[in-house]
Amino acid sequence: MLEANESTPVTAKRSQSQLISLCVNGEWREVAVKPRLTLVEVIRDSIGLTGTKASCESGACGACTVLLEDRPILACLTLAIECDGKRVQTVEGLAEGGKLSAIQDAFLDQGAVQCGFCTPGMLMSATALLRDCPKPSREEINKALEGNLCRCTGYNAIVDAVLQASGQGVEPVMK
């Protein structure tokens, strides 16, 4: 195997792994990554957190949404090496002390979880919205979730879950 040095072809240098540090759900981790690996690949395959879904791999569905420095991003379009030294929150990081977060509880209460494939991305986008806008309107919720596709629920239950989590008087329908 070639080692990267001044005489090594550029293509050989690109294939070498690079050590990066990520703070994932509050825990710092060092991971060796190849420059071409996406954040979703590293989260799922290297770190072993499979809640974040890899679906379209083209940024069209939002299933891979995570929070990078508290902002929602598409992990399938983000290279892992671009995240070196940054904080990443995945759906596994929403629950605290074994207790689901308010948005997770609300998704269950409203029946906003069906097949569950879109749920992690929806939860992460909703979490970011509620941090920035604690009492969002339906229009603000729709705007915040427009990059997250769901084929099962029709979105009404998801919007109601965000309204419930924000304390806007939406009662649980599943209890």
Image (cartoon, rainbow, N blue to C red):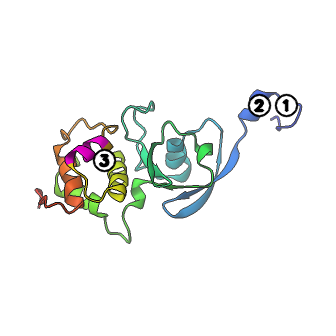
- Circle 1 SS class: loop
Q: CA distance from mark 1 to mark 3?
A: 45 Å
Q: Are marks 3 and 2 in contact (CB under 8 Å)?
A: no
Report helix, strand or loop for mark 3.
helix
User: Is residue 117 something that shows in the picture?
Assistant: no
Where residue 174 appears, as percent x and y from the top left, is 12, 57
Q: What residue sits right under mark 2 in the picture?
A: 12
- Say if mark 1 contacts mark 2, CB within 8 Å: yes
- Say above or below: 54 vs 32: above
Q: So how many labels did they put on this image?
A: 3
Residue drawn at point x = 59 percent, y = 38 percent = 37
Check if residue 88 falls in the magenta segment.
Answer: no
Residue at 22% across / 50% down in the picture? 137
Question: Dot 2 surroundings within 10 Å: few (below 14), some, or many (20 or more)?
Answer: few
Q: Earlier in the sequence, mark 3 or mark 2?
A: 2
Determine whether, in the image, residue 16 is placed left or right of residue 149. right
Residue type for callout 3: Thr
Left or right of 13 in this view: 128? left
Residue beneath label 1, please?
Answer: 8
Q: Residue 119, which numbered label?
A: 3
Residue 48: x, y in percent?
50, 52
Residue 10 appears in which quarter of the rendering? top right
Task: Sort mark 1 into few (<14), some (14-19) or many (20+) by Cα contacts within 10 Å.
Answer: few
Give the amino acid type for the residue marked by disc 2 in the picture.
Ala
Disc assigned to residue 88: none
Is residue 10 positioned above or below 164 on the image?
Answer: above
Residue at image x 54%, y 64%?
Answer: 27
Query: In 3D space, how far apart are the residues under numbered discs 1 and 2 (Cα atoms)?
Result: 6 Å
Magenta-drawn segment: 138-143
